[in-house]
Image (cartoon, helix red, strand yellow):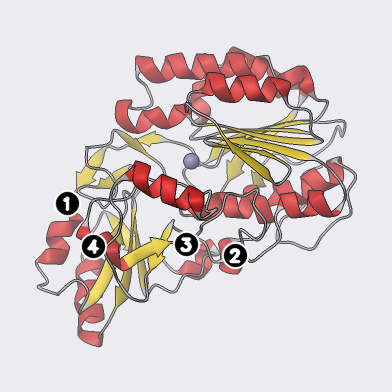
């Protein structure tokens, strides 16, 4: 089976993706719902369970003893590589991020990357080979290598040569929309290139899943929520800690007064809401998550030094992405959730079924 993960796919791009668009006629396809959050989405793809079980939401969680962090991304990547931690990220330059550490250390293809078994654990257990081309990691079963650069051509070249029973590839290029917007010439060009790459891989296997981890939409309204928090005169580290993302803010309170002040302030805002985590099947140790309304973005935030034009991470029932599944089963469901892929892949590959939150698509 071939699994093509096209990061940040807004279904409106199909207008510029003639091949993928045409494949919809002969394959199962439809809107795809993912969990709220960031890193937790792919953790749910890998395990078939909601984030309330695997516990991953964001890439960062509080550090027990806050300490100075390495701020240089190359040095950090080098150290992590030596430690066998193949999850790489660009560290924030903010001092506030010294209070946080990554919620994950390993790439999905590494053993014990999550507290729940992943698709790769199931494949290994059943004697199936796998290959993962997920920049900058290239796994042949559990054996890891590194490749550069990030552009799709390199992923494509490796994918073309891959031979495993299960091949998982990740195209990251459409993430560029953060900087140039979803309707820009640059994004249209990238969408066409990715479409062509998929066209050249599509006949490699009789079973092909094309999917994304989230959509991408232009930010229409930018809010400086940091200034609202600062007006409360609370001390970061002593009264509370928080992470401002582009669409969500997660708070951990150290006293009742801070909790009351922040809650009252957030309740008075009309561009977002405090969410009930249960409604989103997430479970983190934070005290509060505030979610921006669709197309509203927070700036400044802890991760982007520049103004972003487009974003993801809004209410996933509103911001959906898409999937296409070529396989021998003729019937199936149209609207699916990302947790449904694990049991579906196991069925398509004739592997024993497992208990998880997802349901079969075919
Ligand atoms: Zn993504």
- Between disc 1 and disc 3, the foreground one is 3
- Between disc 2 and disc 1, the foreground one is 2
Q: Earlier in the sequence, mark 2 or mark 1?
A: 2
Q: Residues within 10 Å of mark 3 (few under 14, many from 20)?
A: some
Front-most of 344 and 156? 156
Q: Earlier in the sequence, mark 3 or mark 4?
A: 4
Quickly name the residue at label 1.
224
Measured as percent of width and height from the top left, residue 338 is found at 63, 48
Q: Earlier in the sequence, mark 4 or mark 1?
A: 4
- Under circle 4, the secondary element is helix
Residue 20: tell me if it is visible. Answer: no
Quickly name the residue at label 3.
103
> Residue at image x 62%, y 19%?
157
The answer to whether the beta carbon of the residue marked 4 is less than 8 Å from any atom of ligand 1 is no
Distance from the alpha carbon under mark 4 to that under mark 2: 26 Å
- Between disc 4 and disc 2, the foreground one is 4
Front-most of 214 and 121? 121
Q: Residues within 10 Å of mark 1 (few under 14, many from 20)?
A: few
- Residue 101 lies in quadrant: bottom left
> Residue at image x 47%, y 43%?
319
Quickly name the residue at label 2.
54
Q: Is residue 156 above or below residue 298?
A: above
> Would residue 60 be found to the left or right of residue 87 on screen?
left
Residue 48: tell me if it is visible. Answer: yes
Distance from the alpha carbon under mark 3 to that under mark 4: 16 Å
């Amino acid at each position: 089976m071939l699994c093509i993960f096209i990061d940040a796919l807004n279904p409106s791009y199909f207008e510029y993706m003639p091949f993928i668009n045409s494949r919809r006629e002969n394959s199962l396809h439809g809107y795809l719902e993912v969990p709220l959050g960031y890193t937790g989405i792919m953790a749910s793809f890998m395990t078939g369970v909601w984030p309330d079980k695997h516990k991953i939401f964001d890439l960062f969680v509080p550090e027990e003893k806050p300490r100075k962090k390495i701020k240089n991304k190359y040095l950090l990547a080098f150290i992590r590589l030596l430690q066998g931690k193949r999850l790489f990220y660009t560290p924030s330059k903010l001092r506030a991020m010294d209070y946080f550490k990554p919620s994950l250390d390993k790439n999905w293809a590494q053993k014990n990357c999550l507290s729940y078994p992943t698709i790769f654990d199931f494949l290994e257990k059943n004697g199936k080979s796998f290959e993962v081309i997920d920049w900058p990691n290239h796994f042949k079963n559990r054996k890891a290598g590194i490749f550069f650069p990030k552009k799709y051509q390199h992923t494509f070249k490796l994918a073309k040569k891959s031979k495993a029973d299960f091949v998982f590839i990740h195209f990251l290029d459409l993430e560029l929309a953060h900087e140039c917007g979803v309707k820009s010439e640059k994004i249209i060009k990238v969408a066409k290139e990715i479409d062509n790459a998929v066209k050249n891989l599509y006949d490699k296997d009789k079973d092909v899943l094309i999917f994304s981890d989230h959509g991408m939409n232009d930010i229409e309204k930018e809010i400086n929520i940091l200034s609202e928090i600062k007006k409360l005169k609370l001390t970061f580290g002593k009264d509370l800690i928080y992470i401002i993302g582009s669409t969500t803010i997660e708070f951990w309170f150290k006293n009742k007064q801070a909790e009351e002040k922040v809650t009252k302030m957030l309740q008075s805002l009309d561009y977002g809401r405090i969410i009930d985590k249960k409604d989103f099947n997430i479970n983190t140790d934070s005290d509060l998550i505030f979610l921006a309304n669709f197309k509203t973005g927070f700036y400044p935030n802890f991760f982007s030094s520049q103004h972003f034009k487009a974003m993801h991470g809004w209410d996933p029932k509103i911001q959906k992405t898409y999937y296409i599944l070529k396989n021998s089963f003729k019937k199936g469901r149209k609207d699916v959730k990302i947790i449904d892929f694990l049991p579906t892949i196991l069925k398509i590959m004739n592997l024993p079924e497992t208990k998880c939150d997802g349901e079969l698509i075919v």
